[in-house]
Amino acid sequence: MAAAMAMVIMLAALAILAPSARGLDRAEFPPGFLFGAATSSYQIEGAYLEDGKGLSNWDVFTHTQSREINDGRNGDVADDHYHRFMEDVEIMHDLGVKCQLLHILDLMGETPT
């Protein structure tokens, strides 16, 4: 009996949630609506100390205070966008992304004062 009741509850939950789980159709948005993507340099860039890149605050923190991070990892490789940006652009193109907000961390010059 309990198993049957659990099955009924699960089926009812699926019936309620299924319409929202179907995803979005672009036709539901007004003409001219831009679908885009956004990134944060530390979370995607990687390339720790490559090509003269300086240290960011996060580089220093994750290398000196790794015990403060749950899994102790850092962004040395991250999503490796630095080396794979062409693949990333191709993926965004295939998804129909028309714009991207790209945060680039410039640590190659002098630190602004």
Image (cartoon, rainbow, N blue to C red):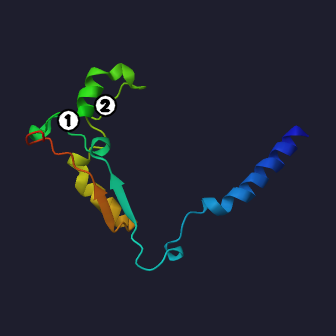
How far apart marks 1 and 2 lie (CA) works out to 10 Å
Location of the N terminus (image quadrant): top right
Crowding at label 1, few (<14), some or many (≥20) Cα neighbours within 10 Å?
Answer: many
From the viewer's perspective, tell me whether residue 110 is left or right of residue 17: left
Location of the C terminus (image quadrant): top left
Where is mark 2, residue-wise?
A: 74
Closer to us: 82 or 113: 113
From the viewer's perspective, tell me whether residue 32 is left or right of residue 12: left
Secondary structure, mark 2, is: loop
Nearest to N terminus: mark 1 or mark 2: 1
Give the image location of residue 72, x and y in percent.
36, 24
**Residue drawn where x is 29% and y is 35% of the image:** 75
Secondary structure, mark 1, is: loop
Closer to us: 111 or 21: 111
Give the image location of residue 6, x and y in percent.
82, 43
- Residue 48: give its label: 1
Give the image location of residue 90, x and y in percent.
29, 61
Q: Which amino acid does label 2 sit on?
A: Asn
- 113 w.r.t. 70: above or below: below
- 69 w.r.t. 30: above or below: above
Crowding at label 2, few (<14), some or many (≥20) Cα neighbours within 10 Å?
Answer: some
**Does the residue at mark 1 contact the one at mark 2 (Cβ under 8 Å)?**
yes
From the viewer's perspective, tell me whether residue 103 is left or right of residue 35: left
**Residue drawn where x is 61% and y is 59% of the image:** 21
Give the image location of residue 45, x and y in percent.
25, 44
Q: What residue type is labelled 1?
A: Tyr
